[in-house]
Image (tube, helix red, strand yellow):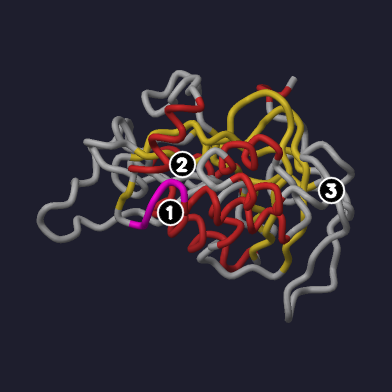
Amino acid sequence: MGPSPDTVGAGPTSGSDPAPNPGPPGLDPLPKPLRDPQPMLERTIAEWGGHEDLWLFGYGSLIWRPEFDFIERRPAWVRGWHRALKMWSRVNRGSVQTPGLVFGLLSGGSVRGMVFRVPAAQGLDTLRRLWLREMPTGVYDPKWLRCTTASGPVSALAFTLSRRSPNFTGELSDERYRHIFANAVGRYGSSLDYAQQTLEELRRHAIHDVALARLVALAVPSDTSAAHTASPAPTDCDVVPPPVYVAGSSDKKSSQPSGPSGSPDKDQQ
């Protein structure tokens, strides 16, 4: 999950930072919601059902700062969606004067990230807290996506971004990215730091995002970027590596999707 939950004029998560507080005077306030996030939470809870463990797909900052307890974590591959630094952030990673960028999950292509398994007993509380982080302004479209892992497919919740959203940046030039990386700073730091942290964490899990590496290289010296790209690494479309288990995790491996049906989302067809 990527990107930060700022909206119109703001920008999680699913690849994203925590929902900002009002903060001290002088900081930009949280934008008004694009839509009420509560009905989407209720629908997601109903679709999950609460009887099985909850799976969540992380593609951005959820990978390096999940902020929820989980019993298993696996590298995963999703067809029909891709990670993109194309979501405006005017609170967490930028300002109204100098908007920053956070990740969104856009339709098309494929993406590698991580799936997290949350015990059923903790699922409801996790979803509610996740909504405060990712969905305070209703910017994302939560979807259950079929995620391929080395231990079998799972159906995981992901926070996707519509190209019709006011927060979608559209195509940006390299010069625009350079300007944003050099100037955009928000409550939780700069857009460049956000992108770099995500890139480094992806590499730590043997996930090499060529497009993101190229963007980050726009803002760093050529010798530094060359050092990062000296060793070959698997691309987003390579074979999924074996699962990664955390300390104290369950030994049980799921071979079938948990929660909602594992059939591909209609946008993937």
Cα–Cα span, label 3 and label 2? 26 Å
| Amino acid tagged 1 | Asp
Mark 1 and 2 residues: CB-CB less than 8 Å, in contact? yes
Q: Secondary structure at mark 2?
A: strand
> Which quarter of the figure is the C terminus placed in?
top right
Of badges 1 and 2, the one in the foreground is 2
In the visual, does 150 lie left or right of 189?
right
* Residue 15 location (% of width, % of height): 53, 47
| Amino acid tagged 2 | Val
Q: Residue at x 10, y 56 (%)?
A: 25
Q: Give the label on residue 102, or none.
A: 2
What's drawn in magenta, residue-wise?
188-192
> Mark 1 highlights which residue?
17
Whichever of labels 1 and 3 marks the residue nearer the N terminus, that label is 1
Asked whether 102 falls inside the magenta stretch, the response is no
Residue furthest to the bottom: 248
Q: Is residue 236 visible?
A: yes
Asked whether 189 falls inside the magenta stretch, the response is yes
Q: Residue at x 43, y 25 (%)?
A: 169
| Amino acid tagged 3 | Pro
Q: Residue at x 54, y 38 (%)?
A: 218
